[in-house]
Each structure stands twice: as C-alpha cells, then as structure tokens.
Amino acid sequence: MPAAPPITIEKDAAIPTWFRVGGRADALATPRTLDELRALVARYETIRVLGDGANLLVHDDGVDGLVLSLSHINNVERVEDDLLRVGAGANLPKLITHTAREGLAGLEGLTGIPATVGGAIVMNAGGAFGEICESVLAVCALTRDGEEVTLPRDQIDFSYRHSGLDQLIITTVDLRVRPCDPDAVRRRVKEVMAYKSRTQPMAEKSAGCVFKNPTLDTERVSAGRLIDEAGCKELAVGAAQVSDVHANFITTTPYARAADILKLIDQVRDRVRAHIGVELETELRIWRRGETP
Ligand SMILES: Cc1cc2nc3c(=O)[nH]c(=O)nc-3n(C[C@H](O)[C@H](O)[C@H](O)COP(=O)(O)OP(=O)(O)OC[C@H]3O[C@@H](n4cnc5c(N)ncnc54)[C@H](O)[C@@H]3O)c2cc1C
C-alpha cells in the first residue's frame, strides 16, 4: 500500500468558532490518525486543542503555536451492548442522533449542546437534564509529552463545568449507554430541544453561557438571573450584545471583534459585582497569543 501523504500544517489558518470572531492560528493541523497526532505533539511545544469552538473566544491577534483539530478522530464503535467507544473529535449532536436511531439512551439530556465529545468532556458539558460525566466510563488521552494515559471515571475530578483534564489531549472516550426503545429516546430528544429553543438564543452566534453559575450560601444560582437583575440585558459593545433571551449569553452580529466581547464581559462582571458583590467567573475559554494554554 502506498504511504499516506504527509500531514498538512496550514499556516495563518482561520479558527472556526461559534462566535465567528477572532484572529488566526499561526499553524493548524487536523491529524487523521493517532500516530499523526503523536508526531505533532512531539514536534510542537505550544499546542491548543480545538473542539467545535462552541465555548471559545479567540483574541483578535490570533494565537501562536499549533492549533490541533481532532475532527478526523471521530469514530464511534459499539464495544458492548451498553458501551460506546468514541473518538474525541466526534460531533456530540450527531452522536446523539445516532444513539437515538439505535435505541441507546443516556446522552439525550445533552441535546442541543454544540460540541465535540472531547470538548464536552473537558467542560463537563450539561444543564438542566444532566451532565456528560454521568455517562463517562473512561477517558484516553495524550499528555503534552506524548505519553498515553487512560483514566477511569473515578480518577477524573468532574464537577459543575469542570473536569480537571485541560492539560491533556483527549483522544477517546468510553460512554455508558442503555439499550431501549428508539421512539422513547427520540421523544426525549425532542422535549430537550424544545426546552433549549425556548430558553436560549439557539439561532444566534454565541458561545453558550459566558459565566459559570456562582455558588452563593452553598446554593448554585443562575448567573443569567444575576446579570439580568444587575440591569445588563441588551447591554452592548460594538457588535456584541447581552442576549435578551438569556442574559448569560453574549451574541454577535457580523463585524464583531473579540475585543468587543472582552469589553462587554468586563462591563457585565463590573455591574454584577457592584450590584450584589459577586465576582462572576468565565465559563468561556479565551485564547490569547503568548498565553500558556
Ligand atoms: C448555542 C450554544 C448553546 C450551548 N449550550 C450549552 C449547554 O446547555 N451546556 C453546556 O455545558 N454548554 C453549552 N454550550 C457551550 C459549549 O457547547 C460547551 O462548552 C461544549 O462542551 C464545547 O465543546 P467544544 O468541542 O466546542 O469545545 P471548544 O469550545 O472547541 O473548546 C473548549 C475547551 O475544551 C478544550 N478541548 C476541546 N477538545 C479537546 C480535547 N479533545 N482534548 C483536550 N481539550 C479539548 C479546548 O482546548 C478548550 O479549552 C453552548 C454553546 C452554544 C454556542
């Protein structure tokens, strides 16, 4: 068999994110295999992993080093009746459609969350209908030194929008599913999607919730409610504005710049601090040139 052509490393490449703003990557590669991924990890010191870009703001100056997209590492294998082994670059909404078709329950609470499986694991994505950690059995990853590690669920520090896995490059995830009636899964998917469409500006350009819901007196409260109460709804900087549907979303229109979004984030944080003395922490990941990822 002829050898596969060498991997292309694109210079000055666009970084696709849901915000559709921000600068370019000095270098971007999309490895086709784990061997190619290992070779790239050995070659570059500064590596940022791009998922679906649904929780990401790239600074207008772009980023240095290598941006790695794992979108080709996306295979889905049914290893056992109730166990899926999924490449980290697999698209989560497509995986949910697949499991609904196959009559496999467990992931449908994550309907409407744009993500790759790797990005969803790092963020422990979820909401009112559960979090991805509830389905995770194990995660395989590369360290930045290229060492392969496998972490069973009980060794992962999952909590609200947290996994502690940020320093790894997640490659494969084992997910527990439950064989059941496909119609029941499809009905649940529709219900969750209807809820999301009612409560979030799904058709706009955004990166989901900008801030984590803070804990006040041991109770987690909605950052969106605090932002609304601090009078920030529809606050705008340039072409970025606080959503009138869900105040924890910032939406953008064409010609927005990352700088607009960053300024707006600061304004919202300042207003909430002044209003009730709470310091909001960003859920959004922000990439800047020169910063260690
Ligand atoms: C319309 C909309 C609705 C949303 N609703 C929700 C919601 O209900 N609940 C929720 O939790 N989130 C929601 N989000 C946010 C987003 O969908 C999640 O945070 C999701 O997990 C991001 O996954 P991603 O693949 O896009 O990751 P990216 O945004 O590409 O990256 C996020 C972080 O994960 C890292 N990363 C990605 N892949 C890997 C990997 N393989 N290995 C190591 N690190 C990796 C990146 O380096 C980065 O630090 C929403 C976003 C949008 C735009």
Image: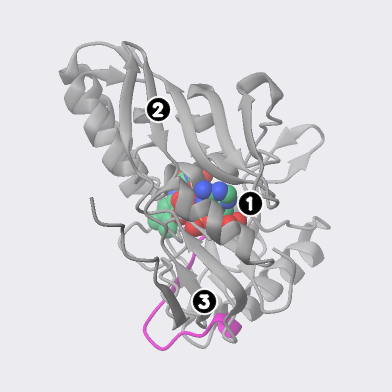
Magenta region, mostly helix, strand or loop?
loop
| 154 shown above or below 230 | above
- Image quadrant of residue 80? top left
Residue 77 in sight from this viewpoint = yes
- The answer for how far apart the CA atoms under marks 2 and 3 are is 29 Å
Q: Amino acid at mark 2?
A: Arg
Residue furthest front as drawn: 1
The residue under label 3 is 27
- Image quadrant of residue 267? bottom right
| 36 shown above or below 127 | below
Do the residues under discs 1 and 2 have CB atoms within 8 angstroms? no
Q: Position of residue 7 (x, y in %)?
A: 40, 66
Crowding near the residue tagged with mark 3, few <14, some 14–19, many ≥20 C-alpha atoms within 10 Å: many
| 62 shown above or below 16 | below
Q: Position of residue 216 (x, y in %)?
A: 78, 40
Residue labelled 3 has its Cβ within 8 Å of some atom of ligand 1: no
Numbered badge on residue 87:
none
- Image quadrant of residue 271? bottom right
Q: Amino acid at mark 3?
A: Ala
Q: Nearer the viewer, residue 108 or 170?
A: 170
Is residue 201 one of those drawn in magenta?
no
Q: Is residue 220 left or right of residue 277?
A: left
Q: Nearer the viewer, mark 3 or mark 1?
A: 3
- The answer for how far apart the CA atoms under marks 1 and 2 are is 34 Å
Numbered badge on residue 223:
1
Q: Position of residue 195 (x, y in %)?
A: 34, 39
Residue 194 in sight from this viewpoint = no
The residue under label 2 is 85
